[in-house]
Amino acid sequence: MTVVLTGSELTLDELVRVARREESVELDAGVPERMRATRAVVEQAAAGAEEVYGLTTGVGAKKKAAVAPADAAEFNRLLVLNHRVGQGQPLPDDVVRAALCRLANGLASGEPGVRPELAEALVDALNSGVRPAVRRYGSIGVADLSANADLAHGALDDFPLAAGEALALLCHNAVSTGHAALALADATALLDALDVAGALDLEAFAANLGALDPAVADARPYPGIRASLERFHSLLDGSYLREAGAARNLQDPLCFRCLPQVHGAARDALGFASAQLAVELNAAQGNPLVADGRILAVGNFDALPVAAALDLVRIALAPALASACERSLKLLQRPLSGLPEGLAVREGIAEDGLAEFGIAMQAIVAEARLLAQPVSFELISTTQAEGIEDRMTLAPLSARRTAELVELGARAVAIELVVAAQAVDLRGARPLGNGTARAYAAVRELVPALRGGEPIPQDLEPVAALVLGLGR
């Protein structure tokens, strides 16, 4: 399929398809005319006596220096090159493709006031598979200046820039927005996988399903709680836990009993972040802004709506992962699970079973929880650019940390699924729910049950790869 860029209708799903499935893109038929109309406003200003930031003047501390029309091409060329101050290893290819798609869509809106040929050049770069090396460190999230310079240089090569176009290529947040969108898509898949693993934990523990009664959402009507309950009921449809007397305890530990509340909070956080990203994918992020025939000095490059939303997502996912860890540890402990210690094949043998996975699970989840620290409230010095550039959001770091948390979370859920599957086998209670049975079968295709006398599974990476697939 081809994703059509209108400047105002790009969706998260479309961005993911372009970034990861390498679907082609094209500009909507009405884009060139709209872009030419706003470009005419810019060209009129460039030919007049009015001072326009980045068009007839320098930028930053050089805002008082004039740029003569004869010098515009060279000024624009050097403006991109002189912002290539990023450091470190390049960002992943899918993040770079997402950024290119977001940038092309932003230009297509007409609000940056560039020529349609520039947007077309970015579309051509995307469709031809150009992979700019965009270094990951150096952006504060108030326009991804250094990353954008790498992006523009790598995508456009020797494409000649007209007056004002270099600033339009630099002054936006396409890199942090694209990275945030991919991280959010993966975070959503991770939470869905946590639902699956949590439901299988309930069966492995022989838990009390009273905690999932629909009355829970009626009494506390958060959308996330209601959606989580619906998910759990679907996954456990047909489960033995629905039979009278199946539950072992009147009151299960909170990590089992509070599943809909913990996952519901995370789902609400993801819903909020998704709404923020839906706006940001089509928002004007640059400065100046061309609107209603005027050129306005604005601060739309401040990416706090994205950075803060992702901070919230990480804060909400951390308890879900911590609870998953606690459930796995309790399944591994005989006094709590009623099963052989470490989920060994039988009681009284010296084999560890899966006990040591408890240590690995704690290490992974502890590291993931450290990534939940918010970053969007960090301070910045007031000395840069004569004190004007005194804001930061750290949106790129917020996106990067969200992606890293999801990567760790997938490995934690992989352990959770393997532990739950072994507990299910030892408990022997059947049938499993329609959804949990499919998850159990998928895990068992990759990791056979312990039979005794063999080492524990040495590589759970295939299960970690399965995790996000279960979520999707």
Image (cartoon, rainbow, N blue to C red):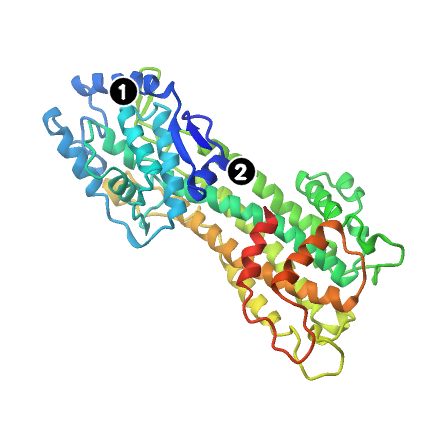
Residue under the point 18% across and 31% down = 160
Seen in the image, is 141 located left or right of residue 9?
left
* Residue at x 74%, y 62% (from the top left corner): 204
Residue under numbered circle 2: 274
Taking the view exactly as shown, the residue that stands out farthest to the left is 70
- Please say whether residue 114 is visible from this viewpoint: no
Q: Which mark is residue 39?
A: 1
- The earlier-in-sequence mark between 1 and 2 is 1
Mark 2 Cα-neighbour bin, 10 Å: few <14, some 14–19, many ≥20: many
Q: Amino acid at mark 1?
A: Arg
Disc 2 element: helix
Query: What whole-number distance in Å separates the C-alpha atoms at marks 1 and 2?
Result: 32 Å
Closer-to-camera residue (173/159):
159
Q: Position of residue 87 (x, y in %)?
A: 28, 53
Q: Tag 1's secondary structure?
A: helix
Which mark identifies residue 401? none
In this rendering, the count of numbered labels is 2
Residue 227 in percent (x, y) is at 69, 41
Whether pointer 1 and pointer 2 mark residues with C-beta atoms closer than 8 Å, the reply is no
The answer to which of 31 and 270 lies nearer the viewer is: 31
Q: Quadrant of residue 130?
A: top left
Instruction: Tell me which corner region of the image, top left, top right, bottom left or bottom right, holds residue 60.
Output: top left
Regarding residue 364, the answer to whether it shows in the image is yes
Q: Is residue 104 left or right of residue 366?
A: left
